[in-house]
Image (cartoon, rainbow, N blue to C red):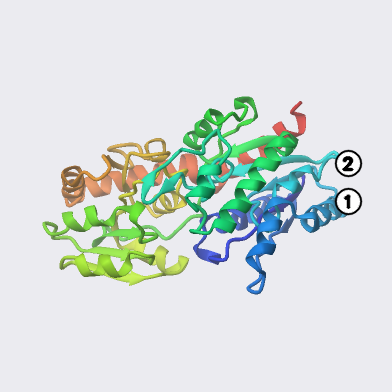
Amino acid sequence: MRILILHSQYLSGWASGENSVVRDEARLLAEAGHDVLTWTPTPGPDTSPSRLGLRAVWSAAALANVRRLIGTHRPQIVHCHNLFPMLSPAVLRSGTKSTARIVVTLHNYRMLCLPATCIRQGEICELCVGRIPWRGVAYRCYRGSLLGSAALAASLTVHRSIRSLNHVALFVPVSRFVRDKHVEAGFASNRMVVKPNFSWPRPLRRGVGEYFLYAGRLAPEKDLPTLLGVWTKMQVPLIVAGDGPDTDALRAMAPPGVTFTGAVGPDEVSRLLEGARALLLPTLCNEGGPRSVVEAYAAGVPVVATGLGALPEMIDHGVSGLLVAPRSADEWSDALESLTDDANVRRMGEGALDLWRREYSPEPGLQRLERIYEAALTAA
């Protein structure tokens, strides 16, 4: 099958889960024998905010280039990932003069919420879901920028009104939770096919691990203070890998036994997973389908997380990990205490690895992608 993959890359590079998903899916398809062409433009360092804003609304250059690529590569499938700011939803109209079918992965809530997270000031916010996102402009939800928020809001409003999304054969949410939020906002349920992210095999954990691990952004919505509060009573060390706006405050409040590594690359994350008893996600967000969970499973590492968003559908409670209530220090304390028992850690590690093999390894990932493409080609 001939496939054209489109993605406006995030400047965070390897740290972006979406960038990694796009790269890994392209490799997966190519290794399976498909003819894959990717175009992944990145904003230049000298591109002005006003020009990026205009691109987000309607990028005539991106639309022209995609039509050129369709003409030369003649793909059967055009698979779009992130559209902002370098592509814009205008590229969804690129297949009108060809037989190519458009597929769009819904990694997050970008079509519903300006920052794509449904989070405002560290709390869940769904004021714009299913509505014109003027509130997101008023609150400057996109990176605190009035101009950036207005540009994204204009893009979503314009393309809804001219029905650019109607050119999409199938949407591919990364979890049932993401699917349901889009259906709630008015997307047609019969044009949705859930496909979770996959992970390549990783080095397996050594024994039962020596420490607990948090790997991610250090920001208010991740609720590290609750976790650090629990660590005043823990004997097993905690490693916190990542950085963000709360770094200094978290370092100041951390009790003994907590080590901060700063930002780390993917190879270092793999190394850290090899020594982890469990990966911890004390999030306050409706997570869409965090890639970190399946990466931990691939290493045979269970996951302890708050039961929000897609996490309850990803974590088999008591089998591949544990679910706790948000901001509940008591539940976190009980969950972590249970994982100081080596037998529990081994059992849940085996459950995590088994779940990865069945649901999140490359083989089911490829099978799901191929079925989605075949369905898109026959969709009305």
| Front residue of 328 and 37 | 328
For disc 1, the marked residue is 71
What is the number of the mark on residue 364? none
Q: Would you identify the image quadrant in which residue 186 lies?
A: top right
- Rate crowding at label 2 as few (under 14), some (14 to 19) or many (20 or more) other CA atoms within 10 Å: few
Q: Which residue does the image show at 30% across and 37% down from the upper left?
A: 317
Q: Which residue does the image show at 66% across and 61% down from the upper left?
A: 52
**Mark 2 falls on what kind of element?**
loop
Q: Nearer the viewer, mark 2 or mark 1?
A: 2
| Front residue of 121 and 217 | 121
Compare marks 2 and 1 and give the one earlier in the sequence: 1
In the image, 329: left or right of 137?
left
**Mark 1 falls on what kind of element?**
helix
Name which residue type carries label 2: Lys
Q: Total marks drawn? A: 2
In the image, 292: left or right of 94?
left
On the image, the x and y values in percent for residue 346 come to 26, 49
- Rate crowding at label 1 as few (under 14), some (14 to 19) or many (20 or more) other CA atoms within 10 Å: few
On the image, the x and y values in percent for residue 314 come to 41, 39
